[in-house]
Image (tube, rainbow, N blue to C red):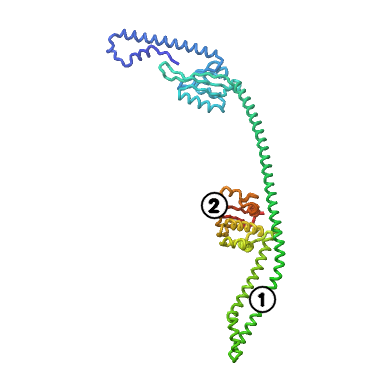
Amino acid sequence: MHHILGEDKAMMRMLEGRNASQIEDRDAFLTHALDQEIAERNLLSALRESESRFRSLADQVPVLIWMEEEARGRVFFNQTWLDFTGKRIEEIRGEGWKKDVHPEDLEHADKTISKALSAREHYTAEYRLKKQNGSYRWLLETGVPRFLGSGEFSGHVGACVDITERKKAELIMKVARDQLEKRVAERTRELNEANARLSREKEEQLLLIRKLEEAQNQLLQSEKMAAIGQLAAGVAHEINNPIGYVQSNLGTLKTYIEDILKLVEAYESVEPSLEGENSARIAKLKQEIDLDFLKGDLASLLTESREGISRVKGIVQDLRDFSHVDESEWQWTDINRNLDTTLNVIHNELKYKADVIREYGSLPEILCLPQQLSQVFMNLLVNAAHAIEGRGTITIRTLAENGGIVVKISDTGCGIAQENLNRIFEPFFTTKPVGKGTGLGLSLARSIVEKHQGKMEVSSEPGRGTTFSIFLPLSPAE
C-alpha cells in the first residue's frame, strides 16, 4: 500500500535536480512545494479511507477474499479467510497460505496461479483448503488482475467460494454414472458373450457339417476304391496265375532255344563235309528261313517277352497297392516311388493327352498313408490331363524344403478362372459339364493333405496352365 512521505523528503524530491540560483522566486517555489505536499497527503488520506472501507466491506462478505501484489505475493486476507483457516495474517501472508492447500491439489493450483500472474490475466482454480478443525473444503478461486491508474500491473485480487457441496453432488453423480456405465458394460459384455457363444455354436455347426460332408466324401471315395480294390484283387489273382505259367515257360523256352542253337552250330560245323544233294538242300533251307537273322532275333524276342510279362506283373501289383485305401497304417514312404506307381496306374489316361516330365529331387522318406497320397496325385494328374486341349505337357517336380517335401504338378492346360480359384476346394464345386465330375476330388485331396498336417496351394493363369503345390512334413506331429 502507499506510504506517507515526510516534509523533508518531499522537499528533497521537489528540489532534486534544481539549481537554487536558477530559482528567481524562492518563496513561490516553497509555496508550490507545500501545496503539492498537501495534495499528496489528502490523496493518501483518501486512499487510507478507501482501504479502510474495502477492508470493512471485505470482512463482512461471507466469502474468502484476498489481495496480491506482484512482487510480495498475497498481502491481504479478509476476516472470513482468517476465521476459516484459524490462522493469523502474519502466518499466511506471501506464500504461507499455500501450506493449508491440500497436497494433492497444490501443484495444479500453483501452476494455474503462476501462469495467470505471468500473463496478467483472469483465472479460476479449484482446490481444497484446510479449515481450522483440520478438515478440508473445496474452494473455487477466481482471480482478477489489478492495474493502477497509470496502467501498471499491480497483482491480482480474488475471492474463493466454498463448492464442497457441489463437489459432493458431482461425486455422487460420478459414482452413479460409473455404476451405470459398469452395468451397461456388464450387460454389453453379457450380450457380446452371448453373441460369441452363438457365433461359436454356428461355427461348430458349420465345422460339423463340413466334417460330415468330408466324411461322406471319404466314405464314397473309400467305397469306390474298395470296389476297385476288390476288382483289382480278383483280376490280379486271375492274371497272376497264367502270367506265372508264361513267365516260367519263357524261362524254360529260353533254355531249350539255347540248346537247339548249340545243336545247329554243331551241324553247321560239319556242313562242309556234306556232298551233293544233301549239301544243296541244307543250303537252300538255310536261305529260305534266313537262319542267321532267326538266330539273332530269337534272343531279342525272348528278352522282350520276358520284359513284357514283368511289366504286366508290375502294373497289376501297382493297381493292387493303389487300391488298398482301407489300410490305415502309417509308413515311411519314398514319394518319388509313390508318384511312379500312380503314373503306371493312370498311364493309359495320360499317354494320349500329355508328355509327362519328371523332375525328381533327392527326397527323404516321409511318414504317411501312401495309398491316400496316391489318390491325391492321381486326382491332380487326371485333372491336369482333362484340362489340356489337344496335346500338352505335365511336369512333376519334387524337392526337399523347410523340414519337409514339396510336390508340384503343373500342366499347360486351359487354366482356372480367377473367380473360381477360391472355390475349387469346396465340396461338389466343379467346372466340368454335368455328368463329367462330382466336385469331390479336390475337396478330398485337400482333406487328405491336411490330415498329414500339410497344405495345398494352387496358382493358375487362364490360357497358360495351372500348378498345384503340396507341402508335406517329414513326420506329422501326434
Q: Is residue 44 above or below residue 136?
A: above
Q: In which quarter of the image is residue 326?
A: bottom right
User: Mark 1 to mark 2: distance in Å?
Assistant: 54 Å
Q: Quadrant of the N terminus?
A: top left
Q: Are marks 1 and 2 in contact (CB under 8 Å)?
A: no
Question: Which amino acid type is marked by label 2?
Answer: Pro
- Does residue 334 appear in this view? no
Q: Does dot 1 land on a helix, a strand or a loop?
A: helix
User: Residue 235: percent from the left, percent from the top?
Assistant: 70, 65
**Circle 2 crowding by C-alpha within 10 Å: few under 14, some 14–19, many from 20:** few
Q: Nearer the viewer, mark 1 or mark 2?
A: 2
Q: Is residue 388 above or below residue 255?
A: above
Residue under numbered circle 1 = 251
Q: Which mark is residue 194?
A: none
Q: In which quarter of the image is the C terminus?
A: bottom right
User: Residue 285: percent from the left, percent from the top?
Assistant: 60, 84
Mark with earlier residue (1, 2): 1
**Circle 1 crowding by C-alpha within 10 Å: few under 14, some 14–19, many from 20:** some
Mark count? 2
Question: Foreground residue, 152 or 130?
Answer: 152
- Does residue 124 appear in this view? yes
Question: Foreground residue, 112 or 102?
Answer: 112
Q: In which quarter of the image is residue 81?
A: top right
User: Residue 367: percent from the left, percent from the top?
Assistant: 65, 59
Residue under numbered circle 2 = 462
User: Residue 338: percent from the left, percent from the top?
Assistant: 63, 62
Question: Which amino acid type is marked by label 1?
Answer: Gly
Give left or right: position of 30 versus 461: left
Q: Quadrant of residue 308?
A: bottom right
